[in-house]
Image: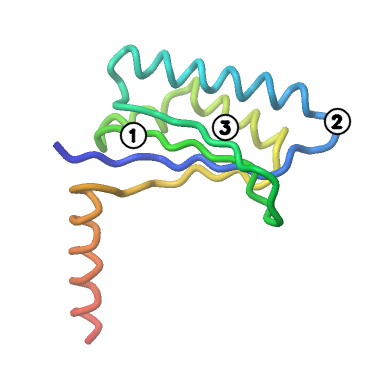
Amino acid sequence: MRFTGMLISWGEIYPGREKQALRLFTEVVTYHQKVLDAGRLSGFEPFVLGVHGGGLRGFMIVRGTPEQITAVRHDDEFLGYVFRAQMLIKDLDVDELYFGEQLGHVLKLFEQQIAALA
C-alpha cells in the first residue's frame, strides 16, 4: 500500500491572538484524532519547536493513503481550521509529503524528467 502525507507547518502567532491559537491547536489535534479513529488516516503527530532563530514554530505530520490525504485536504471541517489558522498565525503551510514507497515513485518521476531535459 502506498502512503503519503501532509506537512502542516506554522510560524509565529499574531500578537493578542495567543489564546485563540492555543484553542485552535487543541481543536485541530482533536479533529485529527477523530479522523484517525474513524479509519480515515493512518496517523498524525504534532511537533512544537524549541527556542531557535527561525520563524518556524511547529508542524504536524499527517499520514495516510493518497486517497485519504486528498479526502482530508478537501474536508470542510479541515478547510475551516486552515482558514481560521490563517487569521491567527503567520506562515501557515499545508504541503504534500512523500515517504516510503511513494517517495520512491516520486523520485522515479523526477529522474524521468531529468532524462527528458538531457
Residue lying at 18% horizontally and 64% vertically, measured from the top left: 108
In the picture provided, is 46 more to the left or to the right than 18?
left
* Tag 3 secondary structure: helix
Residue lying at 28% horizontally and 17% vertically, measured from the top left: 39
Task: Tell us which disc is closer to us: 2 or 3.
Answer: 2
Q: CA distance from mark 1 to mark 2?
A: 32 Å
Q: Quadrant of residue 4?
A: top left
Q: CA distance from mark 3 to mark 1?
A: 18 Å
Counting from the top left corner in percent of width and height, residue 112 is at 18, 71
Q: Which residue is mark 3?
A: 82
Q: CA distance from mark 2 to mark 3?
A: 19 Å
Q: Which residue is mark 2?
A: 16
Residue lying at 50% horizontally and 20% vertically, measured from the top left: 77
Q: Which residue is mark 1?
A: 63
Callout 1 amino acid: Arg
In the picture provided, is 54 more to the left or to the right than 79?
right
Counting from the top left corner in percent of width and height, residue 38 is at 32, 12
Q: Which quadrant is home to the C terminus?
A: bottom left
Residue lying at 32% horizontally and 25% vertically, measured from the top left: 41
Task: Tell us which disc is closer to us: 3 or 1.
Answer: 1
Callout 2 amino acid: Gly
